[in-house]
Image (spheres, coloured by chain):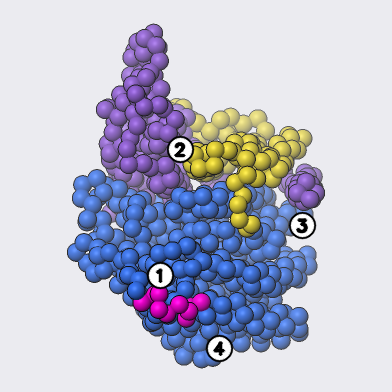
Chain colours: A purple, B yellow, C blue
Amino acid sequence: MKVFLTAIILAFTGGALFVNLGSIPDSFLLSHTASRFYREAVVTETGALNTVSAILYDFRAFDSLGESTVIFATVSGIVLLLSRKTLPVSSAGLSLIVKRTFGILTPFVFLLSVYIILHGHLSPGGGFQGGVLLAVITIIFCIIYGSSFDLSRYPPQRKTLIETTGALLFLGVGIIGIALTGSFLGNPSAWRGVPGTLPSAGSIVPINLGVGLKVGAGLAIIFYSMIQKTLKRQ
Amino acid sequence: MIYSMCFMLFLVGLYGVLIKRNIIKIILSVGIMGYAINLFLILIAYQEGSDFPILTPAETSKAMVDPLPQALVLTSIVIELSTTALLVALAIKIYQRYHTFDIRKIRRLRG
Amino acid sequence: MIFSPLLLILLPLGTAFLIPLVDLFHVETRRLMVIISASFSLFLGFAALWSAWPELLAGTFFHSYHLSGWLPPLGINLAFDSLGLLFSSLVTLFSFLIIVYSIGFIGHHEGKYYVLLFLFQAGCQGIVMTGDIFNLYVFIELSAITSYALIAFERDRSSLEATIKYMVYGILAGVFIFLGIIIIYRSLGTLNIAEIADNFHRIPLTLQRTSVVFLLTGLLIKLGVFPFHFWMAKVYGSAPASISALLSGTLAKVNIYILLRLFWVGTGFSVLREAGWDRFLLGIALLSTILGHVLALREREVKRMLAFSSMGHMGMIVAVLSLNTPLGLFAGLLHAVFHALMKTGLFLSAGYFLRFREGPKEKRFTGAAYRKLPIFIGFIIFALSMIGIPPLNGFFSKWFTMQAFLEKDVYPAIALIYSGNILGLIYYLPFVRQGMLGKESIMKQKSTSSPTPGFFYQERFVTTVVYILILLVMSSGLLPFVFQEPFEVMIAELTEPIRYIEHVLGGIIHE
């Protein structure tokens, strides 16, 4: 019965998808589309070189606000689901060779993540990508050095503090945008700077920073909540 | 046609979500569906003979592929990540209560 | 308008971000902050409605806000018209009521609960205000994810099972909606709802129908119309009562808003009518109505019964909306508002009995009349209103619904509504009877309410909210004509979206 229903659903969905293969128009039906404007005028309008970042953090910044809020909500939900009163920690890490190697590598991971976050408007990257790398550092601590090391360096309270700082930074930049440009999350032309340099592209850099902190700390909290359950007590 | 491969991938993911009994396999199938949709979105953005949408400091504009779907894909990836994380957390919690990942065994009340 | 509607989104959002910070330093201020923020949101909602009322009646109300300073379609815009004002007021009102109720209701893990609740409110406000279809998707996912986490709040077996089931359905719905959006973007090149409304008829016919099918399927899964209703009973039954009230009262009505916005304004109803799908929608909605009422008959647990009753009423709303006559749209919107009031009241009063007394779930309703008579009377009032007894508000919305069906000669629908009413009487009665049993043993039981620091007993919050809802239900029943004029304005806007397009894009652009 279940197989039969699934077959019907798959047939309908597949049919609906495949019937259109011939009729997808070659180009957009509208002649003055938003993407044409983005392609032609991104540097002059926003000062950023990375068009995708300009779309994400300037033209459609509200979407990024919603999206980073989704991560915030997920972190709250997972902490709600998996929280316990006691924090089991263990000092069991990996072998000495791995610990020594990562002792040298981890600062460079941090450097790479900060580079990706701050250069979001110049090269591929941005807040979300760099934030994930920030969270990787916590994962390195947990796996290689043991979760008690992670607990001593970055207790959950500190991670929550970083996360809310990032979130409030994003909102703050938006509100400053009201003061400077008249609309929420506007890109102030006073901050535009010279395209191609690091301090340019207006509000994109602070927004990237806020999103990077939020995502990084959020994913770190998620990981820490999940691993509590599977390590043994020592 | 490349689009048809995308649709096949989507149908595979949909099949997994509907048929499979193991929660972990359902999570993986949701991931496959997500990949298929993101791939479809990026394929839509392609224009013949154009370049990637990042400029060098020297030029002010160039012929590039459509950058808007790429921004949409970034958003979509983040949202699917959140959904997957929540599903995995639920799977962990369910394993603690029921000691199984089989959704048939955890179905106690009829919905 | 005297202030920007953006504040209605930003205030809950900012509060949600601040709560973990406050938690780190001083936990007791959290409750104070929650109350202040909820009250301020309610005040803003009232102020918005009050200041917009003259424009609303004149039919000229439209507030557009260009985010990031870019004109649509380059940027995202908030397109706040009269329909959005109605649903935004609903969201504000119910969020306030549920937040106050929760102060007395939820005893544990309060910090994360309020964060999720405020994020849910921000998400719903974002849905009703946005004018961009991808932004709509982002906010749909935001409210969906917060609702998944809130349903699993109790973390017992049935909640976890319900959440997994709801999540799989919700993910499928989100995927289908996203597919519809992608197909529209690929054909048109825009993501702005007003531009889509202006140009949808230019898309090749198969693409039009495919995108409409995907969007409609995703929405129907979220609404819980047959055959996608399987998640409803489990979810509403295992979530805490305040969350069930939030989901069935607020989220379901916001989904109705999405239905109206996407299919009446966005694509134009003619797409559905020419493909014959409005009759299909009518059919499955009516089927869902009768199925919901029938399945409620055999439920012994109060929240599951209310879940199936919700399914029946949502089916009725979708059915009468799909008629696409002015009377049908009026009846649908009216019933959406009234049903939200009634169902929230039912869930909240049932939640009172389930929370503040001990015992297994099926037995907790016993002797309810002797524990707190006013709340029990409230439960009876809400139930009578659902059945459709005058002069309560359920009677008026059902009356208009039946008139709408009569106008289009859909006689089976009228029979179904009548039988739905009678079935409602049959399935509410056992709970009323159960409430009046067991007098002697109840008098000896104590209440399990405990005092909250600095404020009244927890129970006071809960009971006050139920009293407010009783007041609202009865007054909207006595004054239904208040709704007539504004609704007519909204219906005119829905059936002719030219005004919407003009306001957003500043002049009709035909290419």
Q: Position of residue C233 (x, y in %)?
A: 59, 62
Residue C205 is tagged as 3
Q: Amino acid at mark 4?
A: Ile
Which secondary structure, mark 4? loop
Circle 2 residue: A53
Q: How many marks?
A: 4
First in sequence: mark 3 vs mark 1: 3
- Inter-mark Cα distance, 4 to 2: 58 Å
Disc 4: host chain: C
The disc labelled 3 sits on which kind of residue?
Answer: Leu
User: In front of the other: label 4 or label 2?
Assistant: 4
- Residue B61's disc is none
Q: Secondary structure at mark 3?
A: helix
Decide if residue C425 is on the left or right side of residue C279. Answer: left
Using the image, name the chain to which the residue with label 1 belongs: C
Q: Are marks 2 and 3 on the same chain?
A: no
Quarter holding residue C235:
bottom right
CA distance separating discs 2 and 1: 50 Å
In the current view of this chain or complex, which residue is farthest to the top? A97
Residue under mark 2: which chain is it in? A
What residue sits 77% from the left and 54% below the top?
A: C206
User: How far across and down, in percent of the image, does residue C299 sit?
Assistant: 60, 68
**Residue, disc 1:** C352
Question: Mark 4 to mark 3: distance in Å?
Answer: 46 Å
